[in-house]
Image (spheres, rainbow, N blue to C red):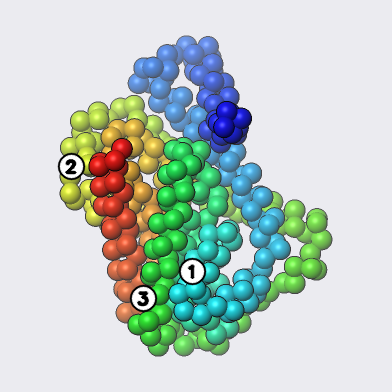
């Protein structure tokens, strides 16, 4: 356990980086990291560098693995199951396959056109951007493995329940007709060389970093401000665990936000540090990730309004229930 703790602290939490940034702020800038200005600068530099390092390494590794599991192979795996087992497999495959929300819509088209039930594709659609492995490891690096594991469990449960309800409601007729007339172009993984896989992984890193870098800078900036400048009394007055409305409030706030979980994590870290309930923070993260406005706009292109409304309603209700449950659990037992 001591070796695991050391590896966790040095590889995920990057305490060595925190120490280096402390030296930079203290000796380079002549500031005390225990002051508001010094603490803000330390928080900002440390979190930005840490997130970019972890993000690049994780996306490269997971994308290299993804090159062995193209969409067609994922579809074939899902087609072997029926009922709740199929929804569970859809949710689990969404977790272990690093498809971002931008690629989820083409996959939705391909899976649906290939004959998979709409409920299964929605289980995949919910879990894929919500609980991918890169996000889980980043959550563990900022909080701990227990919270990361709990995040995975509730995300998968939400995906399974949401997909099962959609499947049982027989909502296939609310998918746009053109979806059934498209095919998912695929590449045989055996045709790819090691060089091709490395190029693909490197390209994924560049593409994702290009899309999220601004939101990481903004998110870390907001986190630094919350952590060092906004008094805990103000945060508690707005989002304290005794405020019944905190969970639905942050859930609704998260929907229109155009951000990735990588930019949301520093804000979540700062909010937890100010005494905001874990369930409230998880609700914000899940809403931003699963119900961001850009992804809903993309989804509207392939489903009709009634199915979109059912999807948003189910996921929103699930996130709120999860938030209240976590807040109650931490209040009673921690």
- Above/below status of 324 relative to 114: above
Residue 330 appears left or right of 123: left
Q: Quadrant of residue 70?
A: bottom right
- Above/below status of 294 relative to 50: below
Q: Position of residue 194 (x, y in %)?
A: 80, 56
Q: Quadrant of residue 34?
A: top left
Q: Position of residue 213 (x, y in %)?
A: 52, 45
Local secondary structure at mark 1: helix
Q: Which mark is residue 165?
A: 3
Q: What residue is shown at x 68% (from left), y 57% (from top)?
A: 65
Q: Quadrant of the C terminus?
A: top left
Q: Which numbered disc flags the more N-terminal residue, 1 or 2?
A: 1
Mark 2 to mark 3 CA distance (whole Å)? 32 Å
The answer to whether the residues at label 3 and label 1 have Cβ atoms under 8 Å apart is no
Q: What residue is shown at x 60% (from left), y 54% (from top)?
A: 207
Q: Position of residue 78 (x, y in %)?
A: 57, 75
Q: Badge 2, how many Cα within 10 Å: few under 14, some, many 20+? A: some
Q: Which mark is residue 88?
A: 1
Q: Position of residue 223 (x, y in %)?
A: 38, 36
Q: Badge 1, how many Cα within 10 Å: few under 14, some, many 20+? A: many
Mark 3 to mark 1 CA distance (whole Å)? 13 Å
Q: Which mark is residue 70?
A: none
Residue where numbered disc 2 is placed:
242
Residue 224 appears left or right of 187: left
Q: What residue is shown at x 19% (from left), y 50% (from top)?
A: 245
Tell me if residue 270 can be seen. yes
């Amino acid at each position: 356990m001591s070796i695991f703790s050391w590896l966790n602290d040095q590889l995920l939490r990057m305490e060595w980086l925190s120490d280096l940034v402390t030296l930079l702020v203290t000796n380079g800038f002549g500031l005390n990291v225990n002051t508001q200005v010094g603490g803000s600068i330390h928080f900002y530099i440390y979190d930005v560098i840490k997130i970019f390092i972890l993000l690049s390494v994780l996306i490269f590794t997971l994308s290299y693995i993804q090159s062995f599991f193209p969409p067609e192979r994922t579809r074939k795996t899902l087609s072997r199951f029926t009922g709740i087992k199929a929804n569970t497999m859809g949710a689990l495959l969404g977790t272990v396959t690093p498809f971002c929300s931008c690629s989820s819509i083409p996959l939705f088209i391909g899976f649906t056109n290939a004959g998979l039930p709409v409920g299964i594709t929605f289980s995949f659609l919910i879990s894929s951007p919500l609980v991918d492995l890169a996000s889980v490891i980043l959550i563990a690096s900022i909080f701990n493995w227990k919270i990361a594991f709990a995040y995975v469990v509730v995300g998968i449960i939400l995906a399974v329940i949401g997909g099962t309800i959609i499947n049982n409601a027989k909502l296939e007729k609310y998918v746009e007709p053109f979806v059934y007339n498209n095919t998912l172009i695929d590449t045989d993984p055996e045709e790819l060389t090691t060089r091709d896989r490395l190029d693909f992984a490197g390209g994924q890193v560049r593409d994702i970093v290009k899309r999220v870098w601004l939101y990481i800078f903004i998110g870390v900036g907001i986190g630094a401000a919350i952590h060092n400048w906004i008094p805990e009394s103000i945060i508690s007055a707005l989002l304290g665990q005794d405020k019944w409305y905190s969970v639905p409030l942050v859930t609704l706030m998260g929907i229109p936000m155009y951000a990735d979980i990588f930019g949301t994590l520093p804000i979540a870290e700062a909010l937890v540090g100010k005494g905001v309930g874990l369930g409230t923070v998880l609700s914000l993260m899940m809403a931003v990730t699963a119900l961001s406005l850009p992804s809903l706009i993309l989804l509207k292109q392939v489903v009709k309004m009634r199915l979109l409304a059912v999807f948003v309603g189910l996921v929103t209700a699930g996130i709120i229930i999860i938030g209240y449950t976590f807040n109650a659990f931490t209040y009673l037992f921690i």
